[in-house]
Image (spheres, coloured by chain):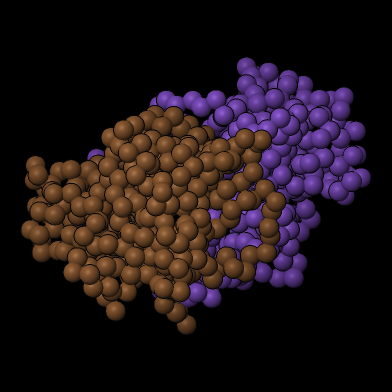
Chain colours: A brown, B purple
């Protein structure tokens, strides 16, 4: 009898826990943004993949095909960036419905080409199949210097939690992508943040080379879920300060206009593809100013790492602590759950 | 207006011809069984992927879920074998319909695990999404010694064309998979050839290390299509001797029983995952006997490489030459076309 599927992460854990083979080429397997493989004397290899399905991850009728290609590449670059690496090569798998126009597919590839050009990534292979549903699966390879590798598992108690840029923009943009009546001059940037994310490769390189960060992940599932991944892998707890979450003015205004709590979008929205990382108290200010100086990107302190037994908390502006649900934008179950719950 | 899609290979050519980035890590890009990347002093890295969609590549109601997982891994191993390499690591992307049972997915993973165990491949990552249609996409990495690499492009005029094992079994097995009334004790092997292909890793290793083969490919699209890929990349023509095509006795009998020409199945069927390779006249007998001795696998001479301008021919048992249609099992258009046409 069909059972209800568990969520993506739970299911992957269940499925992969029974796999037997361990290969000595694999330094980090399942459970981080990329798998880490041995490469040469100085470098490690990073590999990641992400499958995007029409109706789940993108709504075809509201999208330029270039956006589909561009975004599929960008989110995989972001996984490489989350480990401190640089992308090098990708393979592309496409499922296309039978009566699609060649022009449409070519425009998807144009988006792929634009994204790959920007980061010097070669499309080295792939395959195409027909099917009822559109899907695009990207397999991305990258490299990272051995000593620059950043995992989810290195956060220390007392570390500050930092994030680049602003949060919740892509979630706000999703409302606009789904209903174009929200698309105005003043909301255009939010739509762009949803459609054409900019992976933080420059910032990642700086952070990795500084050797000051202790753990890193990209914000793809949503801050609450992604900090949860760091906590789980680092075996720590965390407190996140709600009023420190970096929200842009246009996002704030748009969220209010659609009667959503902007801090809910920032906390649980996902797809911002910002970098979320942990740094010792001592190094925090220096690293923030370095990143600002070299890339002009703002970095904010949004929380602090706690001992594991203290758990994970969201601290309200009035100092009230509510249990942080380590929620995720769960691609297997639904479009994002944009409501945070306290317990 | 929607146009009819061109075939998979034509479409991939069209799409990828406009891509701009060339990365110096890529030694061979699109157009072979795997992409070939620089690795360390002695080795090259091989990367390949293959997406399988329910209804196109497998018929769910007639399959054990273990077969889906096992076959998805096996066909990617076969691509690595076609370059003379050994598989090391894979990533798995799954699209699952919402109300699937967890047990069914676990059984797919059991098939994956069995195949990976056999060849010491670690599943290092992957992702799962929901969707209307089932699909499984495998990204496979492998390694090959620099001097052992075998491409599609090295065939020389006068070389013999060789193939391991027998042809047409998997195509015959497809009829059985689709209609179980054909499943008898005497046709069971054919069904197994369709459901659980055995990539020729041992034979590949021997062939590659012998340095006697000039070009190699695996028989996935069908002999006629796959020899076509060698001809295209090597810029040569070919003649294939129909009566030399290795067909097994059970396949011959089954084909007759369903009123199919067994030589059509052998020529155009696909999915046998045998190795198709070219060897100079001088080295042919030695290599065939080496393979037989070490692996007990039969290898047959089925054709000869011609100058490109002479074209590609199928030579009948009565010596009649008919133009060889370099047909392929084209996953984008349909299930296999099992009828060969002469022109």
Q: Is residue A71 visible?
A: no
Q: Is residue A42 visible?
A: yes
Q: Which residue is depicted at the point 50% across and 61% down?
A: A234
> Residue B97, how many percent across, how many down?
41, 67
Q: Nearer the viewer, residue B80 or A142?
A: A142
> Residue B4, how many percent across, how many down?
35, 41
Q: Which residue is depicted at the point 32% across and 38% down?
A: A289
Placement of the N terminus of chain B among the 4 image quadrants? top left
Placement of the C terminus of chain B among the 4 image quadrants? top right
- Within the image, what quadrant is residue A326 found in? bottom left
How many numbered discs? 0
> Residue A23, how many percent across, how many down?
69, 53
Q: Nearer the viewer, residue A290 or A234?
A: A290
Q: Which residue is depicted at the point 64% across and 43% down?
A: A38
> Residue A163, how many percent across, how many down?
33, 50
Q: Which residue is depicted at the point 81% across and 35% down?
A: B209
Q: Nearer the viewer, residue A194 or B104?
A: A194
Residue A129 drawn above or below residue B152: below
Q: Nearer the viewer, residue A211 or A115?
A: A211
Residue A164 drawn above or below residue B342: below
Looking at this view, name the residue that lies furthest to the bottom: A1
**Left or right of A73 on screen, residue A17:** right
């Amino acid at each position: 009898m069909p059972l209800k599927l568990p969520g993506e992460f739970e299911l992957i854990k269940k499925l992969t826990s029974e796999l037997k083979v361990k290969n000595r080429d694999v330094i980090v397997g399942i459970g981080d943004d990329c798998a880490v493989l041995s490469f040469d004397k100085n470098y490690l290899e990073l590999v990641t993949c992400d499958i995007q399905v029409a109706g789940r991850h993108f709504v075809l009728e509201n999208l330029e095909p270039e956006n589909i290609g561009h975004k599929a590449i960008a989110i995989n670059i972001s996984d490489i960036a989350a480990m401190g690496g640089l992308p090098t090569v990708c393979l592309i798998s496409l499922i296309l419905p039978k009566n699609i126009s060649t022009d449409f597919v070519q425009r998807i590839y144009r988006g792929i080409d634009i994204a790959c050009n920007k980061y010097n990534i070669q499309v080295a292979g792939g395959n195409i199949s027909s099917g009822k549903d559109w899907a695009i699966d990207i397999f991305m390879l990258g490299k990272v210097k051995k000593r620059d590798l950043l995992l989810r598992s290195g956060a220390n108690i007392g570390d500050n939690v930092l994030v680049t840029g602003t949060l919740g923009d892509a979630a706000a943009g999703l409302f606009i992508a789904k209903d174009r009546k929200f698309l105005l001059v003043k909301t255009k940037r939010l739509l762009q943040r949803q459609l054409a994310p900019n992976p933080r490769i420059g910032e990642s390189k700086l952070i990795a080379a500084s050797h000051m960060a202790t753990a890193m992940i990209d914000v793809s599932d949503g801050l609450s879920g992604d900090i949860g991944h760091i906590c789980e892998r680092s075996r720590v707890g965390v407190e996140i300060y709600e009023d420190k979450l970096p929200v842009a003015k246009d996002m704030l205004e748009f969220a209010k206009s659609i009667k959503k709590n902007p801090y809910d979008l920032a906390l649980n929205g996902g797809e911002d593809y910002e970098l979320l990382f942990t740094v010792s108290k001592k190094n925090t200010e220096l690293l923030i100013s370095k990143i600002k100086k070299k890339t002009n990107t703002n970095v904010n302190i949004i929380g602090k790492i706690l001992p594991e037994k203290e758990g994970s908390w969201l601290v309200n502006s009035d100092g009230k602590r509510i249990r942080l649900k380590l929620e995720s934008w769960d691609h297997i179950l639904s479009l994002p759950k944009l409501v945070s719950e306290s317990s």
